Image (cartoon, rainbow, N blue to C red):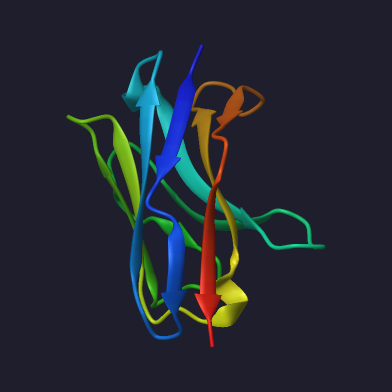
């Protein structure tokens, strides 16, 4: 069973930066595409970014492109989300996601970490 534990959320002023971390345990990290999603109050959960084992060509939502960077440390089984130039609209609970590369129906979620951006 995969377990995902996020950390790094908090309160930051607009224009500031935060780095989220997600620690992966329980299975072979290289067998999973890792991603970040977020859910703001009253809104549906939305895709933020994802990265494959190789780290090549990560994907980003248009709303964060150029401001957020996803990366993974395959030796440490950890995925990161570096967030810069934060805006109040980035306020949400951020969730780590792991999708098995052989079956996208097998996926796991972390418990989420709150990011609040003040204006």
Q: In this view, does 43 lie above or below 6?
A: below
- For this orientation, the residue located farthest to the right is 42
45 to the left or right of 54: right
The residue closer to the viewer here, 34 or 101, is: 34
Give how far across and how far down residue 77 sits, in percent.
28, 29
Q: In this view, does 112 lie above or below 32?
A: below
Give how far across and how far down residue 54 sits, in percent.
27, 41
Give how far across and how far down residue 81 sits, in percent.
37, 56
The residue closer to the viewer here, 31 or 64, is: 64
The residue closer to the viewer here, 69 or 85, is: 85
Instruction: Tally the marks.
Output: 0
Give how far across and how far down residue 36 sits, in percent.
51, 50
The C terminus - image quarter: bottom right
Give the residue displayed 35% in from the left and 65% down from the top. Answer: 18
Q: In this view, does 12 lie above or below 74?
A: below
- For this orientation, the residue located farthest to the left is 75
Give the residue displayed 39% in from the left and 76% down from the top. Answer: 67
Give the residue displayed 34% in from the left and 73% down from the top. Answer: 17
């Amino acid at each position: 069973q995969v377990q995902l534990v996020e950390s790094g959320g908090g309160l930051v002023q607009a224009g500031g930066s935060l780095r989220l971390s997600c620690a992966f345990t329980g299975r072979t990290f290289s067998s999973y595409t890792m991603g970040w999603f977020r859910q703001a109050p009253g809104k549906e959960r939305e895709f933020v970014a994802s990265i494959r084992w190789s780290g090549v060509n990560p994907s980003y939502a248009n709303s964060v492109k150029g401001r957020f960077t996803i990366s993974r440390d395959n030796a440490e089984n950890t995925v990161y989300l570096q967030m810069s130039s934060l805006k109040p609209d980035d306020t949400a609970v951020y969730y780590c996601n792991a999708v098995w590369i052989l079956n996208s129906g097998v996926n796991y979620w972390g418990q989420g970490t709150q990011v609040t951006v003040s204006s």
